[in-house]
Image (spheres, grey):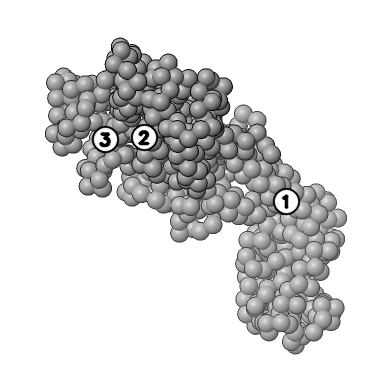
Amino acid sequence: MKLGRWSDIGLKYARAFIYILGIATLYASPYRSKLFYLNALSLSLFIILLYILIAIWLEAKEVPRRVKKVNITLYVFDALMISWIISLTDGWQSPIYPYLFLPVIFVAFDYGFRDAVLFSFYASAVGSIAIVSTGPEQIYYVALTLFMMFLVASLIGFLKSEWESVLEKERLRGSLRSILLEQITIEEAIKKVLETIAKATGADRAVYLRYDENENKLKFSSLGYGLSEGEMQILREREISVEEGGVSWEVLLKNEPLLIKSAESHPNILKDVVENFQVMSILSFPIILRGRKLGVFHLVRVKGSKPFEEKDFEEAKGLVEEVIIILEALERELEIERRRNLLEILVKLISNLSRAINIEEVGSELFNLFRDFMPTLQDIVLVKCRGSEYSLVFYQSEDVIHHPLLQSICQRIRETGHIAFINDENKIERGVIGVPVFEGEDITHLLVLFLEPFSPPSEDIRVLLSACAIELGNILARVYSIAELERYAFHDHLTGLLNRRMFYQRMGREMKGARRYGYPISLVIMDIDDFKAFNDQYGHLEGDRILAEMGRLIREEIRASDFAARIGGEEFAIVLPHTPKDSAIHMVERLRRKIKDMLGISVSMGVGEFPRDGNTLRSLMRKVDAALYEAKKSGKGRVYVVS
């Protein structure tokens, strides 16, 4: 059996153990011979044994521990039984006399100073009767018994009260420290702290004023204790400026707690608060964490209550000092947690962006990630900077972009080189946050976030955006490198059009779509007339210039859904999805005339339609090539359509 178990049994049956010890004391005294004969002493012991059995039964049921009246009644009987034995064994000289003090000691331990003193009067009375009954000459010892009983009760009761006070303080401190183990915010911690300190100091009410750094005002928060909902509503509408002053500002600016015994007579008190809330006495404490003003605690006793004293002030001051330590530790924990979350977001962002291979994927990843912790985000715009000019390289929706606002934020970032944010003058709930993206010391891009409703970014958001911008600069450089490699791999370096390999791949994909959805595709094959003779006469450099200009003119003429390729030396292919050849002829003729007018050369063209003129790419190209040959044969500089 564990030691704790033996300790519980010892405490539960302490009364029985003391009575057995008392009987053993009598047995060891000169009164031993009287214990075995029928007399008043042996009869009293028999009755005491019966009482002990009843007491043991009650203790086993834990009735005295649960019911105070039963426990006090047993102590009353204890004092009575011990006094009875004392009256039969020479009064104050009885070997049992010291046992008379034990019930008083136990009452003091169980119930404290007040109950112990009251019980000592009863124990002194029955003890004095027992002493006097043995002879009038013992009257002197009655007064001694009364004095000693009162002294024992007072001393033990005082020690008990002090011990309970120490335990209560430790319990309160333990309750405050337990806040660190909970996953709560600073405001939630302050709410728990307010209630704990208010109960510990006997305050009727407790309020917390939050310091608003932006407006330089103290504002009553929703955190309070002992206030009705109506009173809380009145306080929430109240703000205190530094010009208005008051006790709260006095405490916060001086960074010193304050005891106000009489609120009405204090010169700095706000009269409306005293009148509306019947304030009589106040304890005020500044809450400043690592040099940062957080707010002010007020502990209040209302009219009709006992005012706060110096003792209350010192106790509350000790608790508030503990609270400051706890809040600082909690703030550090929350800061570490915030930084960990920011780091996780940043790692996730870098991980996702590292897989992006074009600007669209970069922009989409940024939008989706930022939307998780900025729910009012409407759009992300990535702006490329070239000197004083700006060009949009990514955005989600043209409708969200407010161009004057975009221009203003871009200009501000270029001037400051830092994160900036502004509101729309015409629509105050709309605003933007702009983040510069650097390459070396130069701003190459701007990341602009459109938010509605808008609120200034917190310090955490700014840190995250700055870290993202650093990584974004590296990622954009990589994306542009990939785009450049793709351009070289999939495009003809001279004309900027697709190369032959990419032409076949794109045409294959387009034909699959046409088969599935049943739309036509026009194919144009174009060849420069007499290009070999041109090169011989003017040289290959001039020939290359003509080819490059051809590529530019073709790109200008075709639609975004169309594509073109250089498939031979001076041979080009143009693909027009969703376009029958009858409609394609108009664009082709316009392009032919444009080339003639601008470059002074003629081109021949053949035009065919998928699947009307060929159900496979090979068969279609064969027929279009034949049409091109007919155009060449008929005098060049003309367009022939597959018949």
Q: How far apart are marks 2 and 1 (CA)?
A: 85 Å
User: Residue flagged by tag 1: what amino acid is it?
Assistant: Arg
Residue at 64% over, 46% down:
349
Sequence-earlier tag: 1 or 3: 3
Q: Please identify the quadrant where the N terminus is shown.
A: top right
| Lower sequence index among marks 3 and 2 | 2
Q: Residue 204 carries which label?
A: 3
Q: Do labels 1 and 3 touch, CB within 8 Å?
A: no
Query: Mark 3 Cα within 10 Å, few/some/many (few <14, many 20+)?
Result: some
In the picture, measured across the screen, residue 300 lies left or right of residue 405, that is left
Q: Is mark 2 on a helix, strand or loop?
A: helix
Q: Which amino acid does label 2 sit on?
A: Val
- What is the distance, in whole Å, between disc 1 and disc 3 at their CAs? 61 Å
Distance between mark 3 and mark 2 Cα atoms:
38 Å
Q: Can residue 77 be seen in this view?
A: yes
Q: Is residue 401 above or below residue 515?
A: above
Tell me if I can see residue 330 in this picture: no
Q: Position of residue 419 (x, y in %)?
A: 50, 35
Tag 2–tag 1 contact (CB < 8 Å): no
User: Residue at point 21% right, 27% down?
Assistant: 306
Of residues 554 and 484, the one nearer the viewer is 484
Residue 474: horizontal and vertical position, in percent?
A: 68, 39
* Residue sitting nearer the eye, 456 or 49: 49
Residue that carries the numbered disc 1 in the rendered image = 355
Nearer the observer: mark 3 or 2; the answer is 2
Mark 2, residue position: 76
| Residue shown at the point (26%, 20%) measured from the top left | 309
Name the amino acid type tagged 3: Asp
Q: How crowded is mark 1: few (under 14 residues within 10 Å), some or many (20 or more)?
A: few
Location of residue 202 in the rendering, given as x and y in whole percent from the top left corner: 30, 31
State which mark lies toward you, 1 or 3: 3
Instruction: Give the image quarter of residue 3.
Output: top right
